[in-house]
Amino acid sequence: MTVEPERGGEAGEPNGLGLRWRIKDSFVRYVVGNAGGRYSLTGGADLVADRYFAFPFAESGPEALPRFAGGVAFRAHGGMLRVAIVAPALRELDGRTVLTVGTGEEQLAIATLDIPAHDGGWVGAVPRLTESGCDLFGGGYELGEPLDPLESWSGIPRSTTA
Ligand code: HEM
């Protein structure tokens, strides 16, 4: 199933914050290499470099954790492999910090974070796959498999006019 972006094109008020994230470089390499596939950017996501993605800041969630806009859609094996990472967000769920992605209907908790996410502690955190995250990647990884670390980005300068 193709997952549509939750907030197509709406990156919200740029405040100088965003998420830089390779997602999982071994997966991206697999998609564009052995699996003969490609990825496409949706809803304001951009490339920092080859296989290195930038998701603009969208809003602060209820727990003051950031939500980002845009998505990356992977397609390979003639369409059998379709995985979309859309509108990644950090949330508190049952006392843990989780990384969610949008499915078009809900935010799916695909990974838990190694370290507490408050006060910017999510920067550099390694997300580890939940069962839902394993399902998202078609069962190609074990529970707890690390994704690539989350990085912050301040590529959009704030206005400096008084
Ligand atoms: C025609 C169907 C498929 C074939 C023949 C196939 C084959 C393979 C092979 C040989 C590998 C290991 C070798 C490598 O890393 O390059 C692999 C890895 C993997 N496959 Fe597939 N696959 C298929 C479909 C899918 C689908 C539908 C998904 C997900 C929706 C998927 C997700 C993965 C993942 C996550 C890995 C691990 C990549 C990594 O991080 O190294 N595959 N696949």
Image (spheres, rainbow, N blue to C red):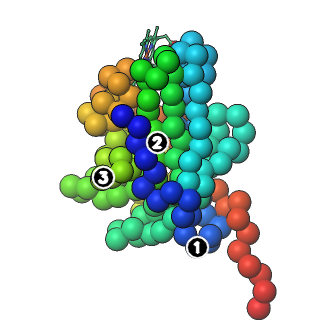
Label 3 sits on what residue type?
Glu
| Ligand 1 falls in quadrant | top left
Q: In the figure, residue 160 lies in which quadrant?
A: bottom right
Whether residues under marks 3 and 2 lie with C-beta atoms below 8 angstroms apart, the answer is no
User: In the structure shown, which secondary structural element does the residue marked by tag 1 occupy?
Assistant: loop
Q: Residues within 10 Å of mark 1 (few under 14, many from 20)?
A: few
N-terminal of the pair, mark 3 or mark 2, is 2
Which residue is drawn at the image coordinates 39% and 68% (left, top)? 61
Which residue is drawn at the image coordinates 65% and 48% (left, top)? 46
N-terminal of the pair, mark 1 or mark 2, is 1
| Up/down of 8 relative to 53, above or below | below
Label 1 sits on what residue type?
Glu
Mark 2 beta carbon near ligand 1 (under 8 Å): no
Q: Where residue 105 is drawn, which disc sits there? A: 3
Mark 3 beta carbon near ligand 1 (under 8 Å): no
Left or right placement of residue 151 versus residue 144 in this view: right
Q: Is residue 140 visible?
A: yes
Name the residue that disc number 2 marks: 85
Quarter the N terminus occupies: top left
| Up/down of 111 relative to 68, above or below | above
Distance of label 3 from label 1 (alpha carbons): 23 Å
Distance of label 3 from label 2 (alpha carbons): 14 Å
